[in-house]
Image: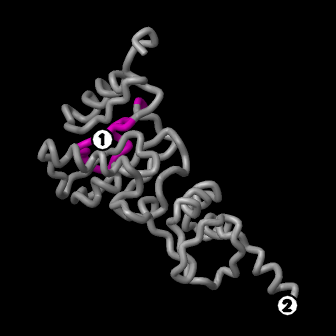
Amino acid sequence: MSTKDKKTARLRLDRFLAGSGISPSPEKAKSKIIAGWVRINGETVRDPARNITGTEKIEVERPGGLYVSRGGEKLDRALELFGIKLDGLIVLDLGASTGGFTDCMLKRGAAKVYAVDVGYNQLDYSLRTDRRVVVMEKTHARDIRPEMFSEGINFFTADLSFISILKVLPELYETFNCIEGVVLIKPQFEAEPDQH
């Protein structure tokens, strides 16, 4: 084996996925590998440190789920129960994180999703590269302004952490003129400390 071959053979799978843009970071790649989402030449691989050459057929697919995260399943059920249709709508996903809600809304016919999150590099790669998704990272829900959007917002979802939705809704309604939406309520962020 030549020196070049030895260097090529030492490419770690998790670093390859991150370096090639398939996963946003080695940590996210590691999670997907351990969860069984990654196949090399048709074989499921669960070792992030597995050495590859980079010439293998690598597939990344979330088994057993319709959406990139469980959040999509929660929203899907709510939309079904409330009879909400999203066909052709421009929607806002506050607290997008991995993108379960974003994914669900796209699959339910939304024309465009503005995926807002105060964090960075969390949105699933498949959504990050979808032309219907506008990624708005490092953006706090309370800082949303109409001029940040190229068209009117028809619907919103919110799955926020570490802030009460009551601090966001008034500004959201004022900004978008009585917009409709679905909010995932997290009691630990809504109750007063003495109510926990």
Q: Residue at x 83, y 82 (%)?
A: 6
Which labelled disc corresponds to residue 157? Answer: 1
Per the rendered image, the range of residues in magenta is 142-159
How busy is the neighbourhood of tag 2: few (under 14 within 10 Å), some, or many (20 plus)? few
Q: Residue at x 66, y 64 (%)?
A: 48
Vertical relation: 65 (above or below) 83: below
Q: Does the magenta segment cover residue 153?
A: yes
Vertical relation: 147 (above or below) 17: above
Q: In the rendered structure, which disc, 2 or 1, sits on the residue that comes first in sequence?
A: 2
Q: Residue 164 location, x and y as percent?
A: 39, 24
Tell which of 174 and 45 is nearer to you: 45
Tell which of 121 and 146 is nearer to you: 121
Instruction: Give residue 109's quadrant in the image.
Output: bottom left
Q: Residue 85 location, x and y as percent?
A: 15, 51
Q: CA distance from mark 2 to mark 1?
A: 55 Å
Q: Which residue is mark 2?
A: 1
Q: Residue at x 42, y 23 (%)?
A: 188
Q: Are marks 2 and 1 in contact (CB under 8 Å)?
A: no
Q: In the displayed structure, does residue 162 sit left or right of residue 153?
A: right
Residue found farthest to the left: 83
Nearer the observer: mark 2 or 1; the answer is 2
Instruction: Give residue 166's quadrant in the image.
Output: top left
Q: Does the magenta segment cover residue 14?
A: no
Q: In the displayed structure, does residue 158 sit left or right of residue 87?
A: right
Dot 1 amino acid type? Thr
Q: Which quadrant would the C terminus be assigned to in this image? A: top left
Badge 1 element: strand
